[in-house]
Amino acid sequence: MSKGPAIVIVGAGQAGTAAAIALREAGWQGLIALIGNEALGPYERPPLSKATLLEETDLGPKLLVTPERLAELSISHFQGRNVVSIDRAAHTVTLSDGTQLAYERLLLTTGARPRRLSIPTAEGSRVAVLRTYADALVLRRFISPRRKVVVIGGGFIGLEVAASAVARGASVTVIESGPRLLMRAVPSSMAELIKAKHERSGVRVETGATVERVGAVEGRSKVILAEGRTHLADLVVVGIGAAPNIELAHAAGLAVNNGIALNEMLATSDPDIFAAGDCCSFPHRLYGERIRLEAWRNAQRQGAVAAANILGANRPYDDVPWFWSDQYDETLQIAGLYREEHFPVSRNLGANGRVVFYLAADGRLVAACGFGSLGAIAKEIRLAEMFIGRRLAPKVEALADPAVNIKSLLI
Ligand SMILES: Cc1cc2nc3c(=O)[nH]c(=O)nc-3n(C[C@H](O)[C@H](O)[C@H](O)COP(=O)(O)OP(=O)(O)OC[C@H]3O[C@@H](n4cnc5c(N)ncnc54)[C@H](O)[C@@H]3O)c2cc1C
């Protein structure tokens, strides 16, 4: 059993690593144990569906922090080890190798895992998901010229894999059971633009198509659709969403509600245990509801705010949600939370793309979604974030007119 006051962090991903660094930078002098079950140093996930699949040679994961920096900050990184239980009364966690660590405060940053197909899948078929660097290496091996890739699920990860695979010369089909792509997070007008971009790039997109089972034929996978059509594939990639890793928290008796349930200070139902990132849900003041996000910036910022609150800052987490996705040479960025009932205002940026702003019934800007060239979209979305955060209600005509600099509307 280790000695001295310790902050133990379960999960060495984006949120956990950001928190570990923030704790040290904020002056925490005690032990920091960062425990991760992957056999690698902490790394970034966004490149896994982008650069990692496109590079000619395997350059390794993009590290969040070097081992040297971890050593410099005296952060003890326990690599390749699972935390298997939490004893809240004794304030200890137990690792898969039997090690016990005492904590003064505990931070759970266990992330999420890909949802799997719940349909029959034949032995010998090659069905993969993408969450880890190890997963990305599997995809890399089977994505190459003349290979056939079927992506099940027209969400962000599926579409990024499709874009990377077609860029590597593979023949790609995306199968989506919903009536359109990106049903959960993106308005239909934007989803149409993205679909058109994929089709122009050579990806076949089939919406309203349900996969019934995956068979295996002579070393290839056979994707069988409900209406009887089939696709033969060298690789089937499943991108049908992710589920938060809540089992450890649940077994310890912590409240769970679409993720580990937190208050606005990111504390769990146990005041000595905090959480951050994809694994948790929290009440958001701008939306008046409990939300869970799966986004890089959210993980990074929540990790830092959880660290501050562990040290007593008492700071509510109320960042405007923000997400980006790269599709070919264009970027998709979303600020805020879009809902079907919001009023859309479209701003056409010509060759640079389009932004759609979403207004609530009281005229407040609550979300914005842009697709196009990085420079143009990033600027508009950054300004939209400020409007959303300050609960401003800009004039519809001004938002719609690309000649009006949105910055001039900020008061
Ligand atoms: C392929 C891919 C592409 C993405 N692209 C984008 C993008 O373009 N834009 C964007 O905004 N977001 C993107 N994301 C999302 C973003 O990467 C995640 O939101 C972010 O990584 C979440 O960080 P996290 O720390 O909550 O979880 P993770 O980074 O998943 O880290 C959690 C870690 O905890 C470990 N763990 C779980 N349970 C235990 C346990 N009991 N003991 C020890 N370790 C444990 C997990 O194995 C994992 O290593 C992408 C994600 C993926 C997978």
Image (cartoon, grey):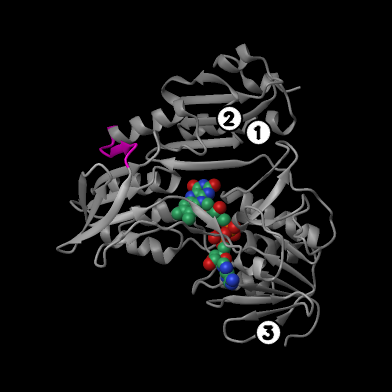
Q: Where does residue 380 sit, x and y in percent of width and height?
A: 58, 28
* Residue under label 1: 385
Sequence-wise, the earlier of marks 2 and 1 is 2
Q: Quadrant of ligand 1?
A: bottom right
Beta carbon of the mark 3 residue lies under 8 A of ligand 1: no
For mark 2, give the secondary structure.
strand
Locate residue 91 relative to residue 394 in the image: left or right: right
Amino acid at pointer 1: Glu
> From the viewer's perspective, is the residue at label 1 or at label 3 nearer?
3
Name the residue nearer the viewer: 67 or 211: 211
Task: From the image, state whether disc 2 or disc 3 is nearer to you.
Answer: 3
Q: Is residue 42 visible?
A: no
- The answer to whether mark 2 and mark 1 are in CB contact below 8 A is yes
Is 71 in front, or is 377? Answer: 377
Tag 2 residue = 368
Amino acid type shown at disc 3: Gln
Identify the mark at residue 100; answer none if there is no mark: 3
Query: Dividing the picture into quarters, in which one does residue 351 lie?
Result: top left
Q: In the rendered structure, does residue 259 fall within the stretch colored magenta? A: no
Q: CA distance from mark 2 to mark 3?
A: 46 Å
Report the span colored magenta: 200-209
Q: Is residue 66 above or below residue 303?
A: below
Q: Secondary structure at mark 1?
A: helix
Residue type pointed to by label 2: Ala
Which residue appears farthest toward the left when viewing the image? 218
Residue 204 lies within the magenta run: yes
